Image (tube, rainbow, N blue to C red):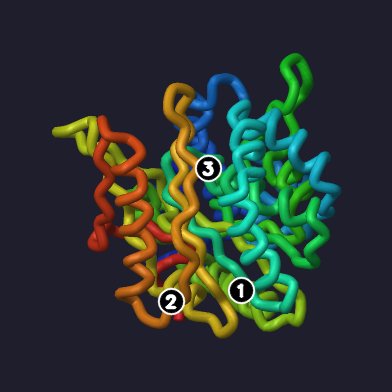
Amino acid sequence: MLVSEVLYRYDSSVIEKISYQERELAVLEEYGELAGRHIMLSNGRMELLDANPRLYPAQQLDCYWVGGDPQPADAVAYVVEQADHRFPAYLESLKSPEHQAMLEQYGNILQRGDNIILVTNHGDTIDVVIGLAGPHCMLDQQGYDFKTGVIISKMISRVGYILEKGSPSIPAVDALKVGCSDIFLSFPRTDSMNRSKLFDFVTDLIDTHNRNIRDLISSRQRSSTGYLLGVAGSGSTDKQNPDDPSTYIMGAISEGTIKMMQAPSTFVLPMAVWLDDEQPVFRFCDLRTVSNAHEAHGVMEVIADTLNQALSEKKFVYNTKAIGTTALGDTIV
């Protein structure tokens, strides 16, 4: 019997009787179930890693950050291309005069020590990573001095990525080290998590975990080095409306994520991403600052509007009342 099945039989009032290791393994088992759904849709590019925190330290229940080992832009581009074949065309599009002017603006902001948070919708597991890799590679090639971080779900610690056919997978977290100084592993309070009784047993750990991420990101934002941070505005993937499959509902961002956007010397760059072979979308929206919750929700609304303009046969709706779809958790203060 799985550890998670045993814990489901407990009442949360006896949580002190459940060991740290039992809770850790139970969470990993649950994330294995959730990751399996994404792996099935990955066209063979992902596989499930064993639940083994000793072998894969990112799986440890209290691991909220993994330090990267950023490589030159060419190496980053190679890894990202293996992950998604649309990346080379996207990267090439950034060489246009229009995009070069935008990149110069972003580069100057980072060079002077200010920060940019690139915010995407979340139609695919890897869309924020693909979207972030474009400006990261171009700005790195152009000699700007900055650091890059990305927020991903803790669930990704159970995912292995197959970079080349026939080769063994590597932990997806390790693949991200090539382009990022910081990989933040959040416990997003998605609707899947809210439906799971299991997470009642780790609520205290989740709150501390996500708060540690917020504190470390805040430290990066206060640093004298410019910081480029990628985050999917909602912590769960955009959901198809069961009554109208052409309509996608984008989950709401949380108070914690909104506060991150309002940090001093920080700009927000909305980006619409849709990983589709026939009609891929990689569109930057206007750079902006965010001073309140209304403006933060406006970031997601402009992404939805951009997707609606680009994909006429689909409709994207930003739902500010969606439950628990957030990058950093609803209870962070």
Residue 212 is marked as 1
Residue 65, numbered label: none
Residue designated by label 3: 127
Please name which of the two marks, 1 or 2, marks the residue nearer to the observer: 2
Question: Where does the image place residue 19, in percent across and percent down from the top left?
Answer: 59, 60
Looking at this view, name the residue that lies furthest to the top. Answer: 166
Disc 2 marks which amino acid?
Answer: Val
Identify which residue is drawn at 59% across, 29% down.
Answer: 86
Question: Which image quadrant is residue 75 in?
Answer: top right
| Mark before the other along the chain sequence, 1 or 3 | 3
Find residue 241 and report its horizontal and vertical position in percent: 21, 38
Question: Callout 1, which amino acid?
Answer: Asn
Relative to 158, does residue 104 appear above or below in the rendering?
below
Where's the C terminus, which quadrant?
Answer: bottom left
Mark 1 or mark 2, which has the lower sequence index? 1
Q: Nearer the viewer, residue 327 or 35?
A: 327
The answer to whether residue 310 is above or below residue 165 is below
Q: Residue at x 61, y 31 (%)?
A: 89
Q: Name the residue under label 2.
A: 290
Q: How far apart are marks 1 and 3 (CA)?
A: 24 Å
Tell me residue 246's x, y (percent).
24, 32
Q: Which amino acid does label 3 sit on?
A: Asp
What separation in Å lies between label 2 and label 3 (alpha carbons)?
23 Å
